[in-house]
Image (cartoon, coloured by chain):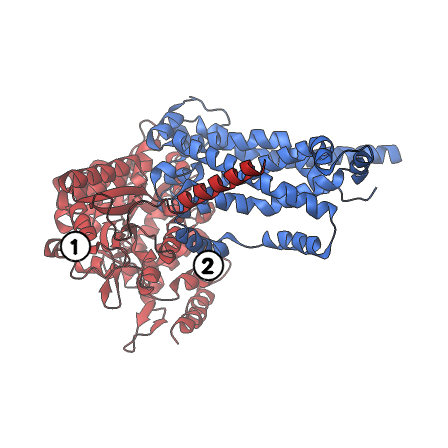
Chain colours: A red, B blue
Amino acid sequence: MRASLRTTAAAAATALALLLTGCAGTDDGRGDNGRIELSFQSLAWQKESVDANKQLVKEWNEAHPDVHVSYVQGSWDTVHDQLLTSFEGGEAPDIIHDASDDLADFAYGGYLADLRGLLPGRLTADIPRQSWSTTTFGDGVYGVPFLQEPRVLIANTKILAGSGVRIPTPGEPWSWAEFRQVTKELTVKGRYGVAWPLKEPVSVTLNLGLSDGGELFHRGADGKVTIRADEGDRIVPGTIHDQVDIDHSASRTALGMGGSDTLPGFFGGKYAMVPLGFSYRQQVVEQAPEGFEWTVLPAPAGSAGLAQGVSPQTLSVSEASPHKKEAAQFIDFLLRPPNMVRLAKGDWMLPTGTEALADPSLHTAENGWATGVAVAKALRPAPAQSVRGYPEWKDKVATPALQEYYSGAVGADELRKRLVDDGNRVLARYQR
Amino acid sequence: MSMRTSRTARAGQYAALLGYLVFLAFPFLWLISTAFKPARELGSLHPTWIPDHPTLDNFRKAFDEQPLLQAAANSLSAAVCAALIAVVVATPMAYVMARRRSRLSTAATGWVVISQAFPLVLLIIPLFLILKNLHLINTRWGLIMVYAVWALPFALWMLVGYVRAVPAELEEAASVDGAGRLRTLVSVTAPLLTPGIVATALFAFITAWNELFFALVLLKTPEKQTLPVVLTHFIGAEGAADLGPLAAAAFLATLPSLVIFAIIQRRITGGMLAGAVKS
């Protein structure tokens, strides 16, 4: 009995020792065969996009037997917490897919590699300066912006044609005043001219506000950021507020919806137009009833033309990666123009690369691709994404203030007071 | 008058209960309905409970796009192992805490209750670092250990109730009849505790089966990912979702929990309340 107990204990101890030493590979990022091992965490989620990413990884691995890339599936829903934990634990993927508005904390925290000097001139020159500014924090560049998504108007073709309103084009878009007038004309009993899905009111308001020069966040000579509401900052929220509360040309119930939630009403003829991200076209194609006709229109323009803010999807390299050079080479491969086009099509988005944007397959009228490409030049970095304290301002100050304003609970003066006065108090805490 | 009042009250109670049942059942019934709807019906302005053109396409798509079977097997192995470990460790502890009342056992019980209030986010980074030093990141055993430890406090709490519900007089009577300590435990206490142990194990199983955050953070290799992690792959940026396949996969993932809860729901409440009143 005692002997068997001893044997069991010895076996258990051996098993535990084996378990605790059973790690694969080494800490220098090389496998047992000396091959460099890189992990690429992708957030692609639509089938075409996942397939495109996996295929490109396969092509890389076939062409580079000494540098093997493993595809790891991540999720948009949980990426921030998951990356934060991985960084803290020193187990982050080598190549990281994320969005530029999620990078600030990681970049300032020293978790991401500064890509200056790692990327080839071809890639650096191919992506416009305004896109690079979305991933530039302080003096460093911490990600490669590669896909972007403008907000467009997805419209019911029959309703537009039947109403006789002027159809806007990227060359001659509606002004905000004309847009308000058009939505009034399209509104009849049982139908609204527009439905604004404003579950996330801050990004919509700030990004579209750029069309009229609305910056809201202003960086002084001392580098400190303050919030100031100028005339240009009032146009977009004012238009939405007036459509909902004065003209009744925008659905009040849609204010609390996400983009997908508005589609049934759009398909059912309850809304003539819905402002949505460019990638929502995929859902429209998949879910629209047989024979439903729709079109993509540019968002309204202001004094700054079609300008609007975007937070591009990005590829970054972990600071802890022992093979940053090879990781950057993989990013370069992934973002060669033909590959960038494949990735953009898979996600129903626009590439940031100039050469990829010029690809003829993106200049088709089908499913509104050409409209998106036409507004690409006007896209700017989303305001405030590099401002420290922005997430708190957004969640605690701006979101409730804008929701109350759009629903008619508070007026423009109260909105301004909360966004600016309360907002500056929040920012001040981050800039002492 | 009083008869009428009591009938009215009874009717009110049943109405409230029915309302509550509808409230609880609606999301699940809607999930089932969505899982069998074609994409075009998902975008309908006038959704119906029963799909006009029921389809299995969402299930096919879900299995085509994500390794659901492998993920389910991963979840199953992690949940079964965690439940077994939790029960094996918790049962003797619970016995001691229930039978040997002391300041230590009172303090231990208090600690168990307090530990339930800790948010996951507070624990995840220290836990991650400990597992990293043990080379257990991205291993099934690492996840199983975390699940077992995570389930342990509640399992202990449940089992203490079950042990207290077994009258100590039975054990005393067995020892009077000449049974030794081990014999008493094996022949008298264990059979009476078995339903409680099973209920506790099933509870630990469900906790592990449904868990997302630890699995998300600790497992990197796609082949090792559990079902809740794989379900997040149907969700895109800004809450956009591949709704049909997501509903189909979520429906399948919910079934084991539902079946198990149907089996153990009485025993869970029994375990919590057992020993609460001195006889």
Of pointers 2 and 1, the one earlier in the residue sequence: 1
Give the amino acid at mark 1: Ile
The image shows residue A272 at horizontal and vertical percentages of 35, 41
Q: Residue at x 30, y 39 (%)?
A: A281
Q: Is residue B206 visible?
A: no
Local secondary structure at mark 2: helix
For the N terminus of chain A, the image quarter is top right
Q: Is residue B226 visible?
A: yes
Name the one closer to the observer, B143 or A288: B143
Tags 2 and 1 both on a single chain: yes
Give the amino acid at mark 2: Tyr
Local secondary structure at mark 1: loop
Name the one closer to the observer, A191 or B46: B46
Residue A432: name its quadrant: bottom left
Q: Mark 1 points at which residue?
A: A127
Name the one closer to the observer, A66 or B43: A66
Q: How crowded is mark 2: few (under 14 residues within 10 Å), some or many (20 or more)?
A: many
**From the viewer's perspective, is A248 left or right of B17?**
left
The image shows residue A313 at horizontal and vertical percentages of 27, 51
Q: How crowded is mark 1: few (under 14 residues within 10 Å), some or many (20 or more)?
A: some
The image shows residue A58 at horizontal and vertical percentages of 20, 37
**From the viewer's perspective, is A349 left or right of B255?**
left
**Label 2–label 1 contact, CB within 8 A:** no
User: Above or below — where is A189 with respect to A176?
Assistant: above
